[in-house]
Amino acid sequence: RKEVEQDPGPFNVPEGATVAFNCTYSNSASQSFFWYRQDCRKEPKLLMSVYSSGNEDGRFTAQLNRASQYISLLIRDSKLSDSATYLCVVTNNNAGNMLTFGGGTRLMVKP
Amino acid sequence: EPEVTQTPSHQVTQMGQEVILRCVPISNHLYFYWYRQILGQKVEFLVSFYNNEISEKSEIFDDQFSVERPDGSNFTLKIRSTKLEDSAMYFCASTLSYNSPLHFGNGTRLTVT
């Protein structure tokens, strides 16, 4: 089983749509969780941290279910500029804060 | 906003040659990392560095790889004898505290021919 698993997509959605991505992780010792965004041939950029209570940042909502080892990202009112690859990232803070990346889910928002 | 900067943006080298990839982390950050991403694949951890020593390294980070913080600002990754399979995008990252999100540089694309 992959350490961090994501549906690679692509998810093709129209502007204004709501889209959700899911991610599962295998290491129950994982302690910190993030969503990063990566544009083609660019560096990963932090989108948001994910907290147990769930958190929202504008059109983006992240949820964490530790029991099921599952993380989600919801994007409301999709914009063309949201087109990117979304990377689910977990860390085990007892292992040098090493980030483990999922393979990413590609989102394409169309006019 | 402070940035992590990496040079060069693109490095082409012949198999067997040594390369040094350079990074300037954000100035007050204390933890430094190298990651790589082979084209079309996921981002992979190479090494973490704190207090002038390696804290963790992956299986990828074998004897051909080394890191150094030669002065107060630079953080370098050296590959002693490059192989074709070392061709990838190499990302440097830094963070201020142990469990904070990482800030990535814009990467160095290494092409080994």
Image (cartoon, coloured by chain):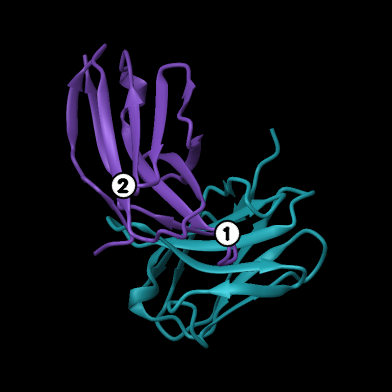
Chain colours: A purple, B cyan
Identity of the residue furthest to the front in this view:
A67
Quarter of the rendering occupied by the N terminus of chain A: bottom left
Picture coordinates of residue B45 (x, y %)?
Answer: 47, 65
Which corner quadrant of the image does residue B112 belong to?
bottom left
Callouts 1 and 2 on one subunit: yes
Q: CA distance from mark 1 to mark 2?
A: 20 Å
Report whether B46 appears left or right of B2.
left
Of B101 and B75, which appears nearest the observer? B101
Disc 2 residue type? Ser
Q: Which residue is mark 1?
A: A93
* Residue at image coords 31%, 47%: A68
State the mark number for residue A68. Answer: 2
Picture coordinates of residue B9 (x, y %)?
Answer: 52, 54
Pointer 2 chain? A
Which corner quadrant of the image does residue A71 belong to?
top left
Sequence-first disc among 1 and 2: 2
Q: Secondary structure at mark 1?
A: loop
Pointer 1 chain? A
Picture coordinates of residue A46 (x, y %)?
Answer: 51, 38
Q: Nearer the viewer, mark 1 or mark 2?
A: 2
